[in-house]
Image: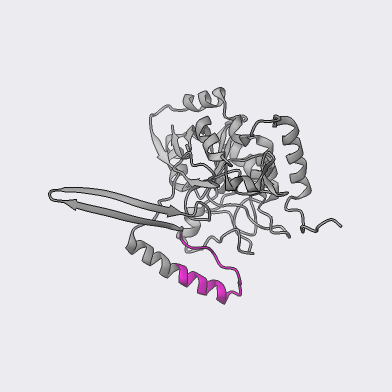
Amino acid sequence: MTEDLGPDPLAPWEREITDAHDAARHVEGEQCRGSVALIDEPARLRGAAEIKLGRAVSLEREVETRPYQLDAGREKAAAEKRDWQRLGHSELPDGHGSVDLKVQIGLYGRSAHGGEVISYDPHGVHNTHLDGLAHIGADGGWHGGIPASASETDEDTMVNWARHGVATRGVLLDVAAARGVDWIPAEQPVTGADLDAALAATGVTLEPGDALILYQGRDRYEAAGHVYPSGAAAVRRPGIGEDGARWIAAKDPGLVLWDFHDARDNPGGRLEVHGLIYSIGLALVDNCLLGPAAATLKSAGVSTGLLVAAPTAVHRSTGVLVNPILLY
């Protein structure tokens, strides 16, 4: 009797693109680098050619470790949980970034020495991080036929990506502006038509290996007092739905950077864009701070630059904090 492992975590369309990717891109005996493999010399040269003003903008949200700010964050989180419970939700948003920093200061006469020990959860909806291929899987394994058990010993996505070099042309799509809204509402997930409109506004033709930078207005959403929930919470939230995920997969990006995540608006609660980590090996940078970058690029009259999102080469890591830099 075959063991019942429950429902398929992938929708039929995701199965189709998974099979197509496997047939076209996988080489027997070689570990697939996923979408990062599309970042080749021409992709890097396209990015370098976009540096016209010699300026740079960071796409990272600050990693909060200051004690007084963390205390304030804990108080806010407690209030948010009470609000969610009052609304009848049993699942709650996750904490405000799981980062533990212990600073160690030594004073030796007139000399001083500073050190630290840091631990963090590289996922969630707060800190800017690069998901590894061992973050989302199916059929008992990760993208490229790597068994999940390999993460206990030698699954080395981050080492492979670090050695390859994650630097390519970045194209910023202001999806909120294309919609004519301050932020994407939860009731209307981002579609392929929205992404087409945002791309058309840039006048850029995407090429395989480019970095897609998708601004959906999260900074304005949170400034207005809204809480962006974890993908583990069984609630609809602003972000990209199935139609938008299909659009992304069809463009063959080298990586995707975004502020809002998956809309989580389907009956099964699947995270369609995150599912592309397994289906096509998508390199995905979550929780980017994109409002300032969108405004900066708009004032400069550009939508592109050289995007550098170099991960730390940590063996067995499922994800790392990262500071993406866009040079233009």
Magenta segment includes 123 = no
Q: Does residue 253 appear in this view?
A: no
Which of these two is toward me, 112 or 211?
A: 112
Q: Does residue 222 appear in this view?
A: yes
Magenta segment includes 95 = yes
Task: Specify start and end residues of the magenta stretch as a single range.
Answer: 77-96
**For this view, does 86 lie left or right of residue 187?**
left
- Judged from this view, the residue extending furthest toward the right is 1
Residue 150 in percent (x, y) is at: 62, 45
Which residue lies at the image location 46% right of the left edge and 71% below the top edge? 78
Which residue lies at the image location 73% right of the left edge and 49% below the top edge? 139
Residue 25 in percent (x, y) is at: 70, 31
* Quadrant assignment for the N terminus: bottom right
- Judged from this view, the residue extending furthest toward the left is 110
Q: Tell me, what colour scheme is on the image? A: one colour
**For this view, does 7 lie left or right of residue 30?**
right
Which residue lies at the image location 47% right of the left edge and 26% below the top edge? 48
* Quadrant assignment for the C terminus: top left
Which of these two is toward me, 293 or 280?
A: 280
Residue 111 in percent (x, y) is at: 16, 47
Residue 295 in percent (x, y) is at: 44, 43
Is residue 327 positioned above or below 215 on the image?
above
Q: Quadrant of residue 65?
A: bottom left
**For this view, does 197 lie left or right of residue 94?**
right
- Judged from this view, the residue extending furthest toward the bottom is 86
Which residue lies at the image location 52% right of the left edge and 26% below the top edge? 44
Which of these two is toward me, 29 or 225?
A: 29
Is residue 276 positioned above or below 70 on the image?
above
